[in-house]
Each structure stands twice: as C-alpha cells, then as structure tokens.
Amino acid sequence: MQYLIIAYDYEDALEKRMECRSAHLEGAKKLMSSGNIINAGALIEEDKMIGSTLYVDFESDDALDQWLENEPYVTGKVWDLEKIQIVPIKLLPKD
C-alpha cells in the first residue's frame, strides 16, 4: 500500500535532527533502492525546516509501523509521533 507521511518535528529539533541525520539518510537510501520510499522532502515554514513528507510503499500497515518504530528521526525524537499523519494514497503510475 502507498501512503503519504507528514511528519512534524518537535519544537527546536534541529540539533537532534543533525545528530540523527546520517543514520536517517543511510536508512532512507536503502528504502529508496528497495522502492519503499518513493519520494521525500522537507516541510519548510518561514525559512525553517519543521518536518518531512514522504511517499512510501509498504506491503502492510504492520510493515509501515515497523519502519516508523525504528526510523532514526522517531527514535531520536526529531519527528513528533503525536503529529505524524499517515494517509493511504494511490500515486499515478510513472509509465
């Protein structure tokens, strides 16, 4: 299933984001290679990063939950779990 993930940061999460960034990017690159992350980007407000958006594709809700539970930006307290929105979607085919 495909999902739109909208993940807002905790207030003043920049320092924690920088601490977790390399682990996050390493995992994201693997998930992009496997097709689990389709695309991703930053949420910007008033020239400040306030979170992330991701288009993802996982076989099940459980697989999505497992990824989120182990995502460095979640475990490192960058993304505020109470402010993560998960929306099932269907993206247009690339072909």
Image (spheres, rainbow, N blue to C red):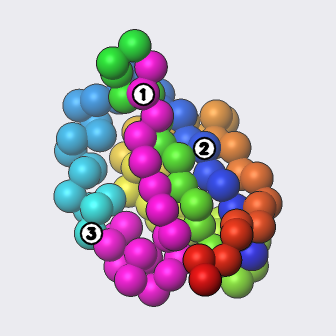
Q: CA distance from mark 3 to mark 1?
A: 22 Å
- Mark 3–mark 1 contact, CB under 8 Å? no
Q: Position of residue 20 (x, y in %)?
A: 27, 50
Front one among 32 and 19 = 32
Say which label, 3 or 2, has the lower sequence index: 2
Residue at numbered disc 2 = 6
Vertical arrangement, residue 22 with respect to residue 46, above or below: below
Specify the segment rendered in magenta.
27-45
Count of numbered badges drawn on the protein:
3
Q: Position of residue 1 (x, y in %)?
A: 74, 75
Question: Label 3's element?
Answer: helix
Residue at numbered disc 3 = 26
Say which label, 2 or 1, has the lower sequence index: 2
- Residue 39 in magenta? yes
Front one among 38 and 77 = 38
Q: Is residue 49 left or right of residue 66?
A: left
Say which label, 3 or 1, has the lower sequence index: 3
